[in-house]
Image (cartoon, rainbow, N blue to C red):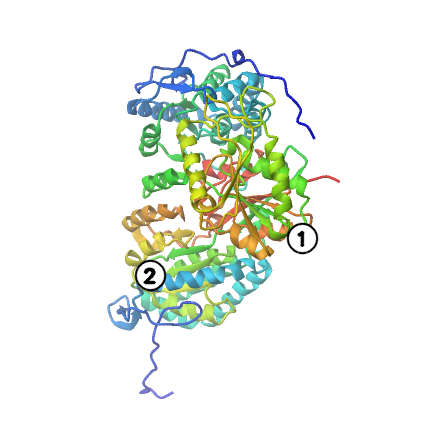
């Protein structure tokens, strides 16, 4: 079968309405931050996109005070039905500006436009729409009558789904009556600052949402600030542990959504073509920068050869390159730093004796790209089987019996997600029950919805986002 | 019974993996009643005892969490039945430990039995209350079920030697978790007697392990142990809780938020403790023909 030639189909970067500079958003206004401005880079071209003002330590203080004032004077007193209307407005404004947000996200993050356009931005809008409806129905959420908010929430989010993670954090916090100070990731602050404009357009009361661009030190300031009642963090397990230690012994509430090393288990009766699609989606979606990525493929020995052959063929058809091109499957790695980390871990796979296969796809000369990679003959003791790579690198292990599959799948300090591929219903339910992970996808992978709670077991963190369960993170219950 | 009969005193030991061993350290400490009169020598548990207890609790977790909710409910109800049968003994021990008048001690024991019954009834209901069918926007069946988080380290209340103890241990078992409990240091005797009840109530070995000793010494070991998933720091006191919370961060343990001072254990509980020991798990499957 010959490959089809694709004509270039780039989305116009003009749609992003990129500005020459962006500034922190505090108390309803864009202000000059006291921190050193940072340059946000397009990871696909390494060009500077724009300059972003960052927060200083005193800006953190001002933002927390603005959030406190908004909480005391306006937001906590407002009837839930009125809060709801602001959230509905925000959901609609995200939908209206979705094309702009999608292109901006792709420029800043490097993810393919088809993902930001079809997944990140619409799901972000859906989160606001879903939580809007909760604001005046909290009595029915199962936490007793009239559950109370916590106060000011400090929220720190990662660079892999910048706008979507913002939505996961801000929507439930606001619906339950909290105000927020959010720090976007250092390398991906732009859509959060357009979101700040959306808050202005929605006429959201000043101080209810504050956005502070900055690096890890600003995150630490926020975590340690005495005026913050709740910390919500999504990011690495390493940083999550530091945050948990930092808030230990205080009255601050904490939820953590951390790393993972998910097993994607393929049993011998699985529909292999369908499983291959799920495996590809599981590890190559968003360049593998997904905390719940299916980074460990556990294949039953009797089908591993056939599966790998199909998998390699399918992976070789993935198109890597310009993230703005509508036909691109795999975009750019978000930063040079992350690319170096992926390379280092992949080299450890070579050194420890795993067999590396790399897609023959052409790789652009400029920009941060890493071709889809599959390691076979991986042993559980290898670093590529234990550590989160956060890149387009799949480790393939094998098993003989279902019990062995479960034992290997659970042999990790993480516990965020897992996948099961089999045609046998009873085996799906058995395996779903045995897997120690917060999300289990059976005959599918990487599905997200605001109504479905998401979060991890063990060192993948605690607390859930989404659904009725997710409201608990922002209520004093 | 003649008035001058010499009574047979009980040796109070630890409860680990369904057995009653002494501390491997060989250490003991004297336990007195509220007026300072000698009652018994209790085992003074060590770090090694903590580790043995965690191994036992982990080993028991698969069976206990995998048992049907109905079965767990019956086993826990059986504990209440056996507790009820030992009312007099518990009332005497609570009265001696806590310095309560007999009638008051009796009502504390009654409340403890009732508390156990309350939690026993939750085993096959909590998943209905906390679980969900998720109406996702796509052709998928998605549901969320709460599952037990694993091994829970419990630093039992220092003041309330039976009702407080039951109020913190029963919710752990009701969720399907297993427990390593450090009893009140100065009032450990009701905890050991409760262990005898557990040992004779069809609670599988290792599901509950009870150590007598100091929360300040054993708490940090539990908090830093890699095979403990959650902690109730009630008995650690305000200062001890800070250290324990810091140690717990190393393995991202769930640490129960507890009030500064011991609460009034006679107040009717809510399901917050059950919720804290449960992990919501969301399962997805496509729908299609």
The subunit letter for the residue under badge 1 reads: A
Residue B220 falls left or right of residue A387:
left
Relative to the observer, which residue lies in front, B194 or A353? A353
The subunit letter for the residue under badge 2 reads: B
Quadrant of the image containing the C terminus of chain A: top left
Residue A91 falls left or right of residue A474:
right
Residue for point 44% across, 61% down:
B57
Tell which residue pokes out farthest to the right in this image. B289
Mark 1 Cα within 10 Å, few/some/many (few <14, many 20+)? few
Residue for point 42% across, 62% down:
B55
* Marks 1 and 2 on same chain: no
Please say whether residue A19 is visible from this viewpoint: yes
| Residue A463, percent from left and from top | 47, 41
| Residue B29, percent from left and from top | 26, 69
Mark 1, mark 2: which one is toward the viewer? 1
Quadrant of the image containing the N terminus of chain A: top right
Q: Is residue B6 shown above or below A52?
A: below
Residue on which the image places disc 2: B184
Residue for point 53% across, 50% down:
A409
Relative to the observer, which residue lies in front, B109 or A12? A12
Residue on which the image places disc 1: A426
Please say whether residue B111 is visible from this viewpoint: no
């Amino acid at each position: 079968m010959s490959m089809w030639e694709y004509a270039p189909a780039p989305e116009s970067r003009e749609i992003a309405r990129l500005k020459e500079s962006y500034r922190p958003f505090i108390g309803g206004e864009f202000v000059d931050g006291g921190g050193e401005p940072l340059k946000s880079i397009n990871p696909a071209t390494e060009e500077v996109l724009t300059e972003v003002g960052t927060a200083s330590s005193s800006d953190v203080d001002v933002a927390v005070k603005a959030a406190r004032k908004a909480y005391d004077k306006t937001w906590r007193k407002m009837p839930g039905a009125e809060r709801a209307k602001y959230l509905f407005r925000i959901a609609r404004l995200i939908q209206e500006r979705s094309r702009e947000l999608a292109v901006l996200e792709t420029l800043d993050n490097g993810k393919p436009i088809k993902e930001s356009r079809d997944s990140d931005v619409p799901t972000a809008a859906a989160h606001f729409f879903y939580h809007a409806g909760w604001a005046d129905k909290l009595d029915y959420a199962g936490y007793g009558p009239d559950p109370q908010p916590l106060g000011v929430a400090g929220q720190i989010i990662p660079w892999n789904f910048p706008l979507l993670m913002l939505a996961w954090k801000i929507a439930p916090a606001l619906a339950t009556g909290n105000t927020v100070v959010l720090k976007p990731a250092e390398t991906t602050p732009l859509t959060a600052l357009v979101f700040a404009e959306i808050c202005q357009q929605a006429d959201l009361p000043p101080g209810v949402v504050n956005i502070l661009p900055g690096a890890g030190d600003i995150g630490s300031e926020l975590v340690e600030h005495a005026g913050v009642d709740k910390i919500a963090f999504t990011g690495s397990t390493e940083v999550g542990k530091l945050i948990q230690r930092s808030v230990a012994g205080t009255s601050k509430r904490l939820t953590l959504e951390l790393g993972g090393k998910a097993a994607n288990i393929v049993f011998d009766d699985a529909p292999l073509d369908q499983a291959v699609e799920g495996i590809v989606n599981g590890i190559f979606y968003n360049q593998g920068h997904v905390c719940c990525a299916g980074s460990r493929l556990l294949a039953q020995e009797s089908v591993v050869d056939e599966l790998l052959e199909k998998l390699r063929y399918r992976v070789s058809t993935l198109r890597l390159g310009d993230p703005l091109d509508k036909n691109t499957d795999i975009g750019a790695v978000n930063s040079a730093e992350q690319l170096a980390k992926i390379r280092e871990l992949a080299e450890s796979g070579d050194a420890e004796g795993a067999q590396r296969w790399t897609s023959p796809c052409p790789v652009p000369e400029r920009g941060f790209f890493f071709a889809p990679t599959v390691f076979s003959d991986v042993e559980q003791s290898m670093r590529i089987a234990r550590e989160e790579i956060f890149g387009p690198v799949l480790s393939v292990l094998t098993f003989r019996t279902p019990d062995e599959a479960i034992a290997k799948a659970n042999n990790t300090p993480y516990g965020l997600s897992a996948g099961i591929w089999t045609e046998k219903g009873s085996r799906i339910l058995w395996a779903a029950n045995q897997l120690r992970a917060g999300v289990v996808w059976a005959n599918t992978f990487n599905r997200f919805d605001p109504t479905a709670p998401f979060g991890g077991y063990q060192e993948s963190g605690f607390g859930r986002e989404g659904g009725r369960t997710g409201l608990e993170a922002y209520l004093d219950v | 019974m003649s008035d001058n009969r010499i009574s047979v005193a009980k040796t109070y030991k630890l409860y680990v993996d369904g057995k009653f061993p002494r501390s491997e350290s060989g250490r003991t400490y004297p336990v007195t009643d509220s007026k300072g009169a000698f009652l018994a020598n209790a085992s003074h548990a060590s770090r090694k005892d903590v580790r043995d207890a965690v191994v036992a609790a982990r080993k028991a977790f698969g069976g206990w969490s995998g048992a049907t909710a109905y079965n767990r409910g019956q086993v826990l109800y059986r504990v209440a039945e056996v507790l009820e049968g030992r009312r007099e003994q518990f009332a005497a021990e609570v009265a001696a430990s806590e310095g309560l008048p007999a009638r008051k001690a009796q009502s504390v024991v009654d409340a403890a039995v009732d508390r156990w019954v309350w939690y026993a009834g939750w085993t096959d209901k909590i998943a209905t209350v906390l679980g969900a069918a998720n109406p996702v926007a796509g052709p998928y069946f998605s549901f969320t079920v709460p599952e037990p988080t694993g091994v829970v380290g419990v630093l039992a209340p220092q003041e309330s030697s039976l009702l407080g103890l039951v109020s913190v241990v029963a919710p752990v078992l009701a969720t399907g978790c297993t427990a390593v409990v450090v009893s009140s240091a100065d009032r450990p005797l009701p905890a050991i007697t409760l262990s005898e009840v557990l040992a004779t109530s069809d609670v599988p070995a290792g599901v509950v392990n009870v150590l007598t000793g100091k929360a300040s010494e054993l708490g940090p070991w539990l908090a830093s142990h890699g095979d403990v998933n959650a902690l109730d720091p009630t008995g650690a006191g305000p200062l001890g809780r800070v250290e324990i919370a810091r140690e717990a961060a190393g393995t991202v343990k769930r640490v129960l938020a507890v009030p500064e001072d011991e609460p009034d254990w006679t107040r009717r509980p809510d399901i917050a403790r059950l919720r804290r020991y449960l992990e919501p798990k969301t399962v997805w499957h496509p729908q299609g023909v």
